Amino acid sequence: MQYRTLGRTGYTPSAIVYGGIVSAKNFGGATIPGDGQAMSDHHVEWAIERGINYFDVAPTYGDAQKFLGNSLKPYRDKVYLACKTKERTAEGAKREIEESMKLLHTDHFDIYQLHEVSSIADIESAFAPGGCMELLTQLKKDGVIRQLGFSAHSEDAAMRALELYDYDTILFPVNWLMNKSKGMGDRILKAAKERNMGVIGMKAFVERAWDSEEEQRNSVFPKSWCKPFDIDDEAFGMACMRYALKLGADVLVPPGNFESFSFGVEHIEQCLAEPFGPQDEAILNERFLINKGREFFQI
């Protein structure tokens, strides 16, 4: 496994991040057959054996915190642990952080993120009197939070976040289809690099939106918000990963299924050794035409 420099954090995480939803059993109100503590233990051990040292989770990922926390007990001092909050008040965030620390068996977070910033009003509410940023910045001073970041699905909101605070990391969609169709990510990735922020790329493994809830429910990826690329389509999958790295992602977070995660682990070194080239561009251009009409989905 190759390790990457994550902006100015001083961290050297694995190029592929373990997304905590992989460990979840109950997610989105559904029970995913075959998952649970034993499966989480197996996935985490598999990841550790292959050099994964960055694990990301959130309270909104069903019961992932409980399972992942137990699985990581033997490895906690050897890995980076990232968590998040969607709460926008200090009171709500405090309650959520305390619960996360209990479930994850930790006394600190290597990275803690304001989760799913979706609008300018949303980010500004976090900075209002009594907002969660009062708490998060204090916890960073206290050492409970080592690095403070945010995740966003709106580029305008992400740009506003950078005006309000000097964040250490950003978790943002770095997706071939959204970038080719809308230029999504160009502004925020440029700004993040200028600030030497760590860039954690999500949605790099996504081909497109689900066409319907039924398609998602009947797929092998029911925990993924969008349709991941087919792992049997190796050339396309690697082109997607290389595109995200080309855009500026330091590390990549696969969707919440073991199939995509293991694909990332098994192919990331080749993607880094052989950067994005004309053959990848041709593959993505062809797939872009196939997905014409789907390119403006929100991820």
Image: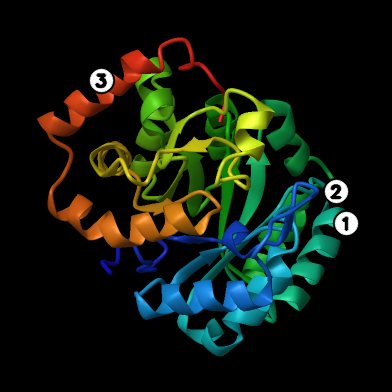
Q: Which residue is mark 3?
A: 285
**What's the residue type where badge 1 is placed?**
Glu
Q: Is residue 84 left or right of residue 204?
A: right
Mark 1 crowdedness (10 Å alpha carbons): few <14, some 14-19, many ≥20: few
Q: Position of residue 15 (x, y in %)?
A: 33, 60
Q: Position of residue 221 (x, y in %)?
A: 56, 46
For the point 39% across and 20% down, the residue is: 183
Against 60, residue 179 (above or below) is: above
Q: Is residue 158 left or right of residue 86?
A: left
Q: Nearer the viewer, mark 3 or mark 1?
A: 3
- Give the mark nearest the N terminus, 3 or 1: 1
Res. 143 in view? no
Q: Which residue is mark 1?
A: 91
For the point 41% across and 27% down, the residue is: 187
Q: How is the image coloured?
A: rainbow
Residue lying furthest top: 293
Q: Position of residue 129 (x, y in %)?
A: 83, 44
Q: Quadrant of the C terminus?
A: top right
Q: Nearer the viewer, mark 2 or mark 3?
A: 3
**Closer-to-camera residue (111/69):** 69
Residue 130 disc label: 2
Between marks 1 and 2, how big is the CA–CA gap? 8 Å
**What's the residue type where badge 3 is placed?**
Asn
> Tag 2, which secondary structure?
loop
Q: Quadrant of the N terminus?
A: bottom left
For the point 42% across and 63% down, the residue is: 9
